[in-house]
Image (cartoon, rainbow, N blue to C red):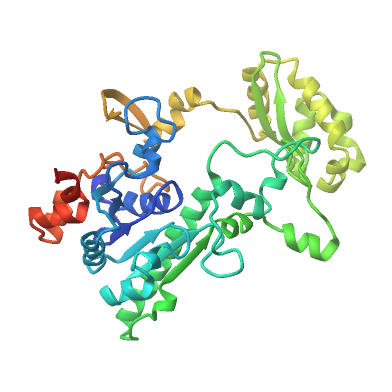
Amino acid sequence: MTHQTIAPLDGVRVLELGNYIAAPTAGRLLADFGAEVIKVERPGTGDELRNWRLHKGNTSMLYRTLNRNKKSVVLDLRTEAGKQAVLALVAKCDILLENFRPGTLEKWGLGPEVLNQANPDLIVTRISAFGQTGPLSERPGFAAVAEAYGGFRNLVGDPDRAPVRVGVSIGDSIAGLYAAFGSMMSLYQREARRRDSAGAVPLTERIIDVALNEAMFSMMESLIPDYQAYGVDRQRVGGRMEGIAPSNAYVCKDGASIVVAGNGDSIYQRYMQTIGRPDLAEDPSLQTNAGRWAHREELDQAIGEWAATLSGTEALAALEAAGVPAGPIYTAADISTDSQYAARNMIQKFDVSTGEEILPGVGFPGIVPVIGDQSLPIRNLGPDLGENTQEILGGLLDMDAAQINAASGREEALRP
């Protein structure tokens, strides 16, 4: 099997109008598996993500990562020429991705009905804070707010402190996953109806509406059923998981922290024997998960005392020998040198431009999921601003230089 030839979405063309993380994540997923993703960016600054976590130059590693395998086209959507260029591109695309505040596309004269006139088969995938309908739909909002509304933030952190945020934009990323899934679901429906001569898919069924708060809410497992059925209101439990024990992180003698998930009934028996506590293994009140959860403080104290007598490496070796699921808490340095990630091509190296200099051999995360036995190769990192403007507008749309300048805002910039 040749990895370079694996491109399940070859022939699918996507127009990405999004900034930041959510829509670009959806576009990245589609691009990773062969779709041609044309990213439209504003003149001058482009996607604001170019400046997020910017350590050097004018293009961040975050932008290079989330916009890999795409093409960048500069268009000025405030101009009629830019709007017409978008509509011309829409006519040649299968999917449009956007994550503007609801009403923005309509304000620009690019609402779903207008897009549908340009391409009656277009799938329009929209990502926003609260969705396109409902009393909160017009509110702006980033993932931090959506995570709070979705119930997620309330469960992250220790019970005696204010809720905290995880270290990545998890709300945006999960919404991006849903947007990619929704886009592919709609594309499958479209192609199935074509195959069955069932007629076109109505516009209402080709609009995929992803709300950040709902994306996070959908991750909350049985939060609502437990509350409505039993009055159970889940609380923050730090490094534990509600109702599951023992499962937590522990500090070892050398300061290393390890995570151990020893909550299965048979695993628990081996776990307690390993830490030298056969009494806890045999205790009748600890034979079920419910019983262990009720005694979680006692169990964590016993495990913590054991871990404190060993280095992280020694503790993990003992747990592995006993078949107890455990692992180190990796840093970026650990991941960079890990043999498992390397074996599956999950760290791919590139010479990368910051906009001011070339940094050689920088590792980037590979493509998930794996097809075959290794991550597919990344074709290109996030492109320079407008890198493909000439190729797309001149080649795909057959525009001349004057038309390209007008659509991309260069005509204005060139005026004395």
Left or right relative to 140: residue 366? left
Residue projecting furthest to the left? 400
Count of numbered tags? 0
Residue projecting furthest to the front? 416
Residue projecting furthest to the bottom? 198
Which quadrant of the view contains residue 359? top left
Q: Position of residue 152 (x, y in %)?
A: 66, 49
Q: Reply above or below: 228 against 273.
A: below
Q: Position of residue 286 (x, y in %)?
A: 87, 41
Q: Reply above or below: 114 against 44.
A: below
58 or 210, which is in the foreground?
58
Q: Position of residue 11 (x, y in %)?
A: 24, 61
Which quadrant of the view contains residue 88? bottom left
241 or 92, which is in the foreground?
92
Q: Position of residue 115 (x, y in %)?
A: 32, 71
218 or 416, which is in the foreground?
416
Give the residue drawn at x 36%, y 42%.
375
Give the residue drawn at x 25%, y 67%.
87
In the rendered image, the quadrant that contains the C terminus is top left
Residue projecting furthest to the right? 284
Q: Reply above or below: 191 against 257.
A: below
Give the residue drawn at x 81%, y 46%.
289
Which quadrant of the view contains residue 303? top right
